[in-house]
Amino acid sequence: MKHQGQEGLLENRKFQVVATWVWNLMGALVVSVVVAAILPSNIALDRAALRAQPRWAIIPILSEIVLVGLLPVIFTVLSKEPAAQYGLTRKRLVSSLALSAVVVVAYFAFLSIRAGHLTTSVTFPGLAHATPGNILLALLALLAYGPLEVFFVLWLIHNTDQIFKTQAPVWSLGLLLTIVIYGVLHAFSQGANSIVIAAQFLALGLIYKTTRNAVGPMLAFMVMNEYAWFLAKVLLP
């Protein structure tokens, strides 16, 4: 038997947004505790450990899928919302891709200036000794740390705007609140680099708000997210 009260709660935007933020924050803490309990006491799940034990890459990949993408996708399905509402559409696709390409070029220019030489975040994985399982995990890494993470942020922007009834065509309270909170949360794990992450998502959020198309931002962040390519390279050396 269906319980109307429970359905109403699950479909309530305020509950969805708050639950998504809490799940993202508390879930990360739970994963950290579980990983610390599973791995040897003298090993941290850092890049050196992942290079030494590529099979451990499944931990950050699944964690990203569950903690970042899971609830927004579930809530979207439960609410029976069309994918186009979150920019998954062909409308204004060219504009979305073109503007997102500008963000990618600007980001790589920033990296090159900071490094003192031409550089990008992309490191192409190899396929010479690839197994089907590792290929699948590498693709999941690129999707989880690219399109899914962007969907998470854009979903929060849209639904926060709905809560506060701030449907401004470009700048909005939902956009600003989401970016600020996301940047602050990343500051705990990434320090000053959280400013760069916030700037990336602010630019991509503005593109989504302007074009109402999320395809460009999703692909752009997948290209820019160096950690996604690191995981792919670990799995497909």
Image (cartoon, helix red, strand yellow):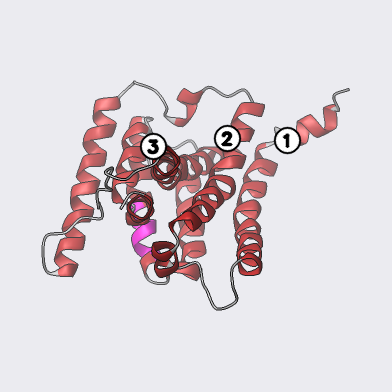
Helix, strand or loop status at disc 1:
helix
Amino acid under disc 2:
Val
Residue to which mark 1 is pinned? 10
Where, by quadrant of the figure, is residue 183 drawn? bottom left
Rendered position, 127 above or below 118: above
Please state the extent of the stretch shown in magenta in the rendering. 194-200
Spatial CA distance of label 2 from label 1 is: 13 Å
Q: Residue at x 56, y 52 (%)?
A: 63
Q: Residue at x 42, y 48 (%)?
A: 145
Disc marking residue 73: 2
Spatial CA distance of label 1 from label 3 is: 26 Å
- For residue 171, say whether it is visible: no
Where in the figure is residue 7, as x and y percent of width and height?
Answer: 78, 30
Spatial CA distance of label 2 from label 3 is: 20 Å
Amino acid under disc 1:
Leu
Q: Magenta stretch: residue 6 in it?
A: no
How many dots with numbers?
Answer: 3
Q: Residue furthest right?
A: 1
The mark that comes first in sequence, 2 or 1, is 1
Residue to which mark 3 is pinned? 209
Amino acid under disc 3:
Lys
Helix, strand or loop status at disc 2:
helix
